[in-house]
Image (cartoon, grey):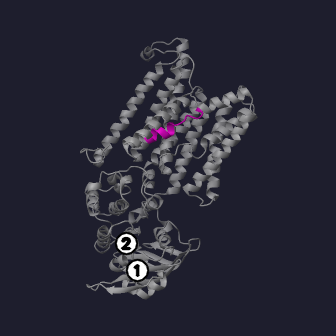
Amino acid sequence: MLRLNGAGLTSTPALMPISDHIVAGDLLAIVGPNGAGKSTLLAMLAGLRQAELGSVELDGFPLGDWLPNELAARRAIVAQQEVPSFAWKVRDLVALGGEPSPRRLADTLEAMQLTSLAARDVTHLSGGEAQRVMIARALCQLAACSEDSERPRSGGMLLLDEPTSALDIGHQQRLMRLLLDCAHQDGLAIVCVLHDLNLAARYADRVWLLQGGERVAHGRAEEVLTAETITRVFGAELTTLRFPDGRGQALLLDR
Amino acid sequence: MSESAIVTEPGESPDGATRHRRRVLWGFALLLLVALGVAAFSGSVGLSPRLLLGELPSSLDGYVWWQLRLPRLLAAVLIGAILAASGTAMQGLFRNPLADPTLLGIASGAGLAVSVWIVLLGGAGNAWGLYGQFVAGFLGALGITVLVFALGRRAQGGGTLTALLLTGLVLNTLASAAGGLLAFIANDEQLRQLSLWGMGTLAHSLWPGVIAALLVIPPTLVLLLRSAHGLDLLQLGEFTAFGAGLDTTRLRRGVIVATALGVGLSVALAGIIGFLGLLVPHTLRLWLGPGHRLLMPASMLGGALLLVITDTLARTLASPAEIPVGLLTSLVGGTYFLWLLLRRQIH
């Protein structure tokens, strides 16, 4: 479990203190307008930027006290679009940092629909394919450290920065379903910066809404992502529509 | 290589990858031994292979072997290995296939110090000339690296690789300019010595320098071998690599310290041997893939092999005169690179 005790940042880009906790089994979406501090918050949750106010604790210990490789066994990061400059093969890149068993590797490639690309050079992939490769890699990293090395470690954490930005809607759905499975079945804590509010509304268990370096709303998706709040924070006018299955509401831009 | 055609591809299974790795490295080691064997017996004074059978060498042969050829071969192996390995490490660290070991100004720092020694301190022609040149070159290389590090930390975006790169670029230019200024006021003899140094040659591989290389270079090679996994992770981008357990600061420090010591010593001993640190990793990466756990040791062996071969050519092509080996590596490397570029354009 990741606990934030009034954790914030004072140096630019700054972040107002947040006290909350992120538990295993939940998919948390971080949303907000451009420049709201979403990626900065993610960097603080990852331990890349040390909290300058308060503290961030993983399983009871401040992030800064963990050794990098111990931390790597518990949480993996999918950063925004970074394609390696060298010609790695997809399967070699996915195996980096986790050294997965051949079966685990094959399963993960399958789950991310990368099997047919396994021998492909990563510098020749499309943006969406590259994104899936990086996500597959992170899943392998988390699996490598669990007792049963075929599944991701329960209680592990996956931090993703806009993982759907380059994906078509078919792959968006598959990824979000996979992330939900990872949270609900494997017991991972998933923290996902999302640009698309509809994805957050449909899939996230909880939503944090950021504006100008401050968390201005948090809670269940339908509590946070109301037409009123979104208009206030994003300056967009929209209509909400309840999904027929009763799980959350869709957000439709007004003309 | 097409991406789908090969069924039993190396690296398909962890086992296969290990076997492939071992085969490549043994292949290189074998080639290196053969090249050393040939190199040992060719030169202005041809040594007879019967030396190996324990035949007592004439006093001249013995002198040539013990005082000239053996230290020179050792220097070629060590310098070739560290230049290529540092090139691999720098390219990996900066995630750029155009990086080379002298990216952060090692060569121009050493060059400036050597110029100071030769031009201002009267190091040309006096009895201490050559040793002074070694020491000055080494100190210059280390000095500029320390400076790049210290200033890079304070520069805008302090501590990032970009800040380091920019600081290196600026100091590189400043040191070259200062060196140029010294060359401008130098007399003819000093100028000749300076320009010979700049061309790079192993002709001054005497025991004191080679012993220094034997003490300094192997540990730096070990340090670079140990950074291979970290360099692999770094290819994921700094944030993701951090998430995968990489201590970027430590990796960067290790690579730069190893490069400064190893390449600094090479430059001090042999001047600037161009293109080797760029060419070897680049070529091997095309052939063996970008994984540093194979690429790093392969670069070491490949760099040693290439320098032993080119230095032997440098000694023998115009025998008894010598071509500076740095000219040969630049000539061969440049031509090959051009060919590579054009060939890839066509495909």
Name the amino acid type tagged 1.
Val
**Residue A87 image position (x, y, % from top left):** 39, 49
* Subunit bearing disc 1: A
The outermost residue toward the left is B7
Tag nearer the camera, 2 or 1: 1
Label 2, secondary structure: give it. strand
For image coordinates 48% across by 15% down, the residue present is B47
- Which mark is drawn over residue A190? 2
Relative height, residue A94 to residue B112 (above, below):
below
In the rendered image, residue B324 lying in the magenta stretch gets the answer: no
The outermost residue toward the front is A255
Res B204 → quadrant: top right
Task: Give the magenta-colored segment's residue range.
Answer: B270-282
In the rendered image, residue B279 lying in the magenta stretch gets the answer: yes
* Subunit bearing disc 2: A
Relative height, residue A43 to residue A87 (above, below):
below
For image coordinates 34% across by 63% down, the residue present is A139
Relative height, residue A203 to residue B270 (above, below):
below
Reading the image, the residue beneath label 1 is: A207
Mark 1 Cα-neighbour bin, 10 Å: few <14, some 14–19, many ≥20:
many
Say whether marks 2 and 1 touch (CB < 8 Å).
no
Looking at the rendered image, the quarter that the C terminus of chain A falls into is bottom left
Q: Disc count in the image? A: 2
Q: Along the line of sight, which residue is nearer the eye, B199 or B65?
A: B199
Cα gap from disc 2 to disc 1, whole angstroms: 12 Å
The answer, for residue B181, to whether it is visible in the render is: yes
> As drawn, is A140 to the left or to the right of A229?
left
Looking at the rendered image, the quarter that the N terminus of chain A falls into is bottom left
**Residue B315 image position (x, y, % from top left):** 53, 22
Mark 2 Cα-neighbour bin, 10 Å: few <14, some 14–19, many ≥20:
many
